[in-house]
Amino acid sequence: MNDIIRAMIERRSVRKYTAQIPDRELVDQIIEAGLYAANGRGYQHTKIIILEDPVVREEIRKHNAAFGGWPEDFDPFYGAPVRILVIARRDWYNRQYDGALVMGNMMLAAHALGLGSCWINRAREEFETEYGRELLRRIGIEDEWEGIGYCAIGHPTEPLPSPPARKEDRVHRL
């Protein structure tokens, strides 16, 4: 079987990570895979933000937990040492699709490089707040942007489960 197709079949969301930070070279490859995602009309109206600042990471963790309805001390990033935010221009009609392709590319790249990943939601809600808009302004991102998702990345603490069987009646030919 082709390696890319095998990665698509075997990749699973990881929700338990070691504290070991992946090599920067691997993270850079994951980001590059995201930058090369297919996108509407080739406009590249998405941005990737690596969340490295510990204070910002903690603020976002708290906001994300609040939006998810969890206790303040819950970690919705499951201890992942690498957190990457994907945003897209709010005025771009293809923003969710383009951003989802960036996320998918990064998760597949992480798996192919022996790392785990998980799509973390609630970025849209967070970046609709004044806090989110101010955070973007701090790094020089103006205009209106929509949070698409966070990509949590790290070394899994346990082996990935086998892919579950696919449901019947999902493919039709006309």
Image: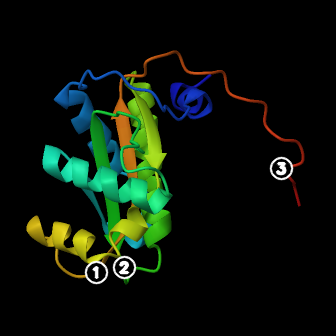
For the question of whether residue 170 can be seen, the reply is yes
Disc 1: CA contacts within 10 A as few (<14), some (14-19) or many (>=20): some
The residue that label 2 is drawn on is 90
Q: Is residue 136 above or below residue 7?
A: below
Q: Which label's residue is closer to the chain start, 2 or 1?
A: 2
Q: Position of residue 34 (x, y in %)?
A: 35, 48
Left or right of 136 on screen, residue 47:
right
Q: Which label's residue is closer to the chain start, 3 or 1?
A: 1
Q: Position of residue 38 (x, y in %)?
A: 43, 57
Q: Is residue 7 above or below residue 71?
A: above
Q: Is residue 152 above or below residue 41?
A: above
Closer-to-camera residue (59/24): 59
Q: Residue at x 45, y 27 (%)?
A: 16
Label 3 with label 1: CB-CB less than 8 Å:
no
Q: Position of residue 56 (x, y in %)?
A: 18, 53
Label 2 with label 1: CB-CB less than 8 Å:
yes
Task: Give the structural element (helix, strand or loop) at label 1.
Answer: loop
Considering the image in quadrants, where does the N terminus appear?
A: top right
Measured in 3D between alpha carbons, the distance from the residue under mark 3 to the one under mark 1, in whole angstroms, is: 38 Å
Considering the image in quadrants, where does the C terminus appear?
A: bottom right
Q: Quadrant of residue 165?
A: top right
Task: Give the structural element (helix, strand or loop) at label 2.
Answer: loop
